[in-house]
Image (spheres, rainbow, N blue to C red):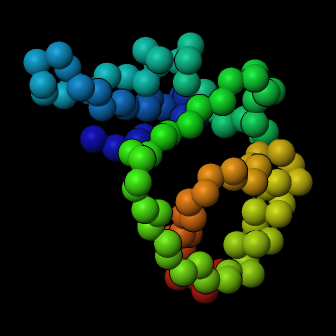
Amino acid sequence: MSWRGSRSSGQRVWVLRSSQSGGSSVSSGEEFSDVVSMHPPSQLPRDRGVRHEIDLVPGTKYCVTRQFLYFASNAFFAEKAKSGMVRESKSPHSTPIFRVRKPNRK
């Protein structure tokens, strides 16, 4: 099973989903075309006033990891923030960035 392309190019997209019996089945992505877009939005949706938080068990200690400075990532996220696609996190936890250099070294 693999992605075969987008609907706009006339090709199908295949989706793997779980069945009630515990197995999995494959269906065409066209079945979900009313809720899944092949073209992601260019910015975040408007604020609907709903906030979600994951509360930790009282007394749980935070996992603190060292954050490395990646200047290329800083520029990337600054550009995305300027366009409204990302915002600064209010989470007390840090999330490391996983980066893989492309074969052309960019």
**Residue 26 point in image, percent of width and height:** 26, 27
Split into 4 quadrants, where in the image is the C terminus?
Answer: bottom right
Residue at x-position 75% and y-position 21%: 48
Whether residue 52 is visible, yes or no, is yes
Split into 4 quadrants, where in the image is the N terminus?
Answer: top left
The front one of 57 and 44 is 57
Residue 78 is drawn in which quadrant?
bottom right
Residue at x-position 37% and y-position 23%: 28
The front one of 7 and 41 is 41
- Name above or below for residue 33 compared with residue 40: above
- Name above or below for residue 48 compared with residue 101: above
Whether residue 102 is visible, yes or no, is no
Does 10 sit left or right of 71 as displayed? Answer: left
Report the residue that reaches farthest toward the right. Answer: 82
Does 76 sit left or right of 91 as displayed? Answer: right
Image label count: 0
Residue at x-position 75% and y-position 36%: 44
Does 101 sit left or right of 2 as displayed? Answer: right
Residue 68 is drawn in which quadrant?
bottom right
Residue at x-position 29% and y-position 27%: 17
The front one of 93 and 20 is 93
**Residue 104 point in image, percent of width and height:** 59, 83
Report the residue that reaches farthest toward the front. Answer: 59
**Residue 86 point in image, percent of width and height:** 74, 49
The front one of 83 and 37 is 83
